[in-house]
Image (cartoon, rainbow, N blue to C red):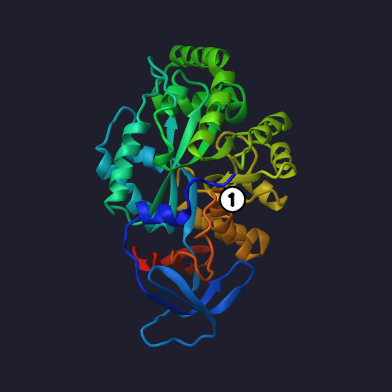
């Protein structure tokens, strides 16, 4: 299905209107299929030319052999929620939170982000979730329209199947809101991400400060919500994603049956499948597999699910998301480069692959005609160090 909006119209309508001219020379350019010593020239915010050789033209920045790669594309980050609620029940002013979130991402090399926001609320108890997304989106769109951000922001609605008000909240959004992704989230205890009730208890009780009785009541409530609303909410969320013109994503697929259902819904990519079985089924059904950078860097899942490294070594990893650690995205790409001994393939997991999954055709690669979103990176041992970040040819970090 084609998106009802083009990447160029999005950029024109919602990105800062800043654009610039830039030449990064004597660099190791990470192209789609090779690393080439050369120069990349950006004019009016768009890549105009790519040349081979170590010559440094007058006025160009001499990268002294450092890597130059496309700006990172992030499809799922909880970071905006962390900024608006830095601690449980602490509501931070939204505009300063959004600006701080934007600045943090730009400092890590992320130049395009789909900000993940939960839709679907639960009322009452320590496990409650309030309706916040519509108001926050209005504030984000206003900030974006006024050019307050350094990077390019789009929307990712996390549809909580196990909630009370999912369809009402989704219904408050319109195609003009430019929702790029809707993901199907089913956090029913005892399955998917939280097959381990011990892991769920550790996560929830620490985050929400629940005692044993409160946790038991929370689990009982979620199981009841799943029984009452699960099928209706899942079907309705798929319909709403189509109405909004959004890419559909699944979340925490665990079994072949989960993946078969996802494929039937038209899911384009799977966020954090929890087993090798599910990842294999995703590839068999033409669904791209996303895993979390923290999982990859730590060497395993904090919930006890399949390790991202295991899927990478099996050739089952396509996209990486920073998830809850923005700085992990660039680090994860270089970790994959070591695993695969293939820098272009690794960089694609955080640039061209997520851009393709989100139907953005104007970014994610160093190629003539794409946006001038680029990074200059120097390696210090196994750690990538950012020397510069540019959005549409303008330096932002």
| Residue 88 placement: quadrant | top left
- Lateral position of residue 327 relative to residue 85, left or right: right
| Quadrant where the N terminus is found in the figure | top right
Depth check, front residue: 257 or 105? 257
Residue at (56, 58) in percent of width and height:
352
| Quadrant where the C terminus is found in the figure | bottom left
Q: Is residue 255 above or below residue 290?
A: above
Residue at (56, 19) in percent of width and height:
232
In the rendered image, residue 28, in percent from the top left (x then y), is placed at 53, 75
Q: Secondary structure at mark 1?
A: strand
In the rendered image, residue 223, in percent from the top left (x then y), is placed at 55, 15
- Can residue 382 be spotted in the picture? yes
In the rendered image, residue 187, in percent from the top left (x then y), is placed at 54, 26
Depth check, front residue: 207 or 356? 356
Residue at (52, 12) in percent of width and height:
220
In the rendered image, residue 149, in percent from the top left (x then y), is placed at 31, 53
Q: How many numbered marks appear?
A: 1
Name the residue that disc number 1 marks: 319
- Lateral position of residue 12 relative to residue 183, left or right: left
- Can residue 86 be spotted in the picture? no
Q: Is residue 148 above or below residue 162?
A: below
- Lateral position of residue 192 relative to residue 61, left or right: right
């Amino acid at each position: 299905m084609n998106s009802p909006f083009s990447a160029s119209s999005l950029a024109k309508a919602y990105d800062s209107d800043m654009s610039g001219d830039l030449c990064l020379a004597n660099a190791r350019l990470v192209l789609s299929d090779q690393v080439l010593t050369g120069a990349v020239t950006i004019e009016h915010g768009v890549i105009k030319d790519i040349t081979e050789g170590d010559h440094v033209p007058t006025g160009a920045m001499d990268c002294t052999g450092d890597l130059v790669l496309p700006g990172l594309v992030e499809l799922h980050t909880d970071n905006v929620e962390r900024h608006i609620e830095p601690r449980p029940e602490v509501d931070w002013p939204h505009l300063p939170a959004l600006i701080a979130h934007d600045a943090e991402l730009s400092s890590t090399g992320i130049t395009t982000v789909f900000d993940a926001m939960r839709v679907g609320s639960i009322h009452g108890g320590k496990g409650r979730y309030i309706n916040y997304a519509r108001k926050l989106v209005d504030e984000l769109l206003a900030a974006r329209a006024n050019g307050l951000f350094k990077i390019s922001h789009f929307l990712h609605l996390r549809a909580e199947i196990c909630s009370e008000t999912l369809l009402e909240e989704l219904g408050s959004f319109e195609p003009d809101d430019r929702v790029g992704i809707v993901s199907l989230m089913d956090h029913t205890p005892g399955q998917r991400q939280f097959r381990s009730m011990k892991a769920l208890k550790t996560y929830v009780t620490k985050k929400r400060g629940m005692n044993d009785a409160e946790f038991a009541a929370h689990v009982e409530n979620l199981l009841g919500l799943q029984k009452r609303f699960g099928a209706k909410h899942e079907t309705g969320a798929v319909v709403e994603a189509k109405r909004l013109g959004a890419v559909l994503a699944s979340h925490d697929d665990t079994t072949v049956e989960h993946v078969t259902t996802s494929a039937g819904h038209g899911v384009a990519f799977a966020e954090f499948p929890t087993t090798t079985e599910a990842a294999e089924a995703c590839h068999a059904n033409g669904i791209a597999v996303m895993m979390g950078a923290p999982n990859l860097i730590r060497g395993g899942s904090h919930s006890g699910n399949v390790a991202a490294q295991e899927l990478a070594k099996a050739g089952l990893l396509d996209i990486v998301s920073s998830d809850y650690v923005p700085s992990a995205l660039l680090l994860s790409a270089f970790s994959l480069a070591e695993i695969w001994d293939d820098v272009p393939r690794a960089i694609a997991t955080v640039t061209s692959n997520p851009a393709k999954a989100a139907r953005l055709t104007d970014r994610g690669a160093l190629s003539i005609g794409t946006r001038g979103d680029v990074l200059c990176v120097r390696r210090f041992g196994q750690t990538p160090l950012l020397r510069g970040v540019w959005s549409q040819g303008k330096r932002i970090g």
